[in-house]
Image (tube, helix red, strand yellow):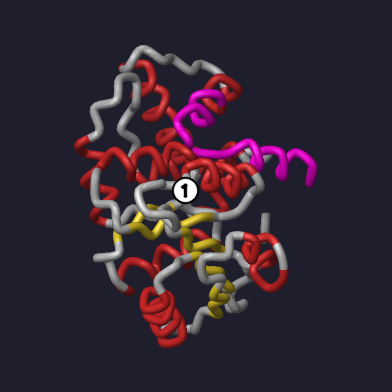
Amino acid sequence: MAAEPAAGELITVVIVDDHAAIAAGVRSWCSQAVPPIELVDAGDRLADVWTGPGAGADVVIFDLELVPRRPDFGELRRLVDNGRRVIVYSQHTDDATAIKCVDLGALAYLTKREGPDHLVPAIRAAARGEPYTAPSLSGALIADDAPGRPRLSQRETEVLRAWFVASSKELVAAKLNITVKTVDTYIARVRVKYANVGRAARTKSELVGRALDDGLITLAELNETATSL
């Protein structure tokens, strides 16, 4: 996985999309962002995500359906498993597709109706390893009736992810600019929500397992943290 860009450091993005007009539009949005974002256009060439400039990009913008009527969930899983920070940018507007992409580990799901007001913030969030909930995804999550899935707020998810990759709650508090007591409160809320859907998680390791099952964090992220300690 690419390291988190330092404050003020240029963010690089690789886009995989077979529509040249979409890539051109995204390039324009990125160039006009403040500060600007550097875009690598891979066209429909998935190989360019793994080699050349695309290999080192902080974020991958992924068109889920490069082949008509064949959404490539397998490639999304491969990207996530290799620690890439992925935004799915898709023509699909159905809730099931959005939920599945998030379950597989996409940090954001945006439809192609959602323009720079959401794509640019999603890129910046993904570069930090953080999720971004656009209106389309928010609606999908509200409508999601999958059994056993607790409805975590974006802040609860952010605190949980930070805790999983930190050695102490003090570090989480410092990173998120909150108190340790607030960290404890968010974690307690998450435990209650999991207990309420019949999936109690009394220890940190159990909570990690739940989060992995629900796509809140990936093994690649956890493994990277473990090897850096």
| Residue 59 found in image quarter | bottom right
**Of residues 91 and 59, which is closer to you in this image?**
91
Q: Is residue 51 above or below residue 12?
A: above
In the rendering, at what x and y percent does residue 163 appear? 57, 39
Q: Position of residue 53 (x, y in %)?
A: 68, 73
Q: How many marks?
A: 1
The overriding secondary structure of the stretch rendered in magenta is helix
Residue 212 screen position, x and y as percent: 53, 30
* Residue 130 drawn at (x, y percent): 49, 53
Part of the protein shown in magenta: 209-229
Residue for point 33% across, 74% down: 116
Q: Is residue 26 left or right of residue 170?
A: left
- Front-lying residue, 91 or 216: 91
For the N terminus, give its image quadrant: bottom right
How dense is the environment of label 1, judged by Cα within 10 Å: few (below 14), some, or many (20 and up)?
many
Q: Quadrant of the C terminus?
A: top right
Where 142 falls versus 58 (above or below)? above
* Residue name at image x 56 percent, y 28 percent: 208
Q: Amino acid at mark 1?
A: Ala
Say which element carries label 1: loop
Residue sitting nearer the eye, 17 or 175: 17
Residue 164 image-quadrant placement? top right
Q: Is residue 225 magenta?
A: yes
Q: Residue at x 41, y 15 (%)?
A: 199
Q: Is residue 184 above or below residue 111?
A: above
Residue corresponding to mark 1: 106
Residue at the image point whose x is 43% and y is 75% from the top: 23
Q: Is residue 223 left or right of residue 148?
A: right
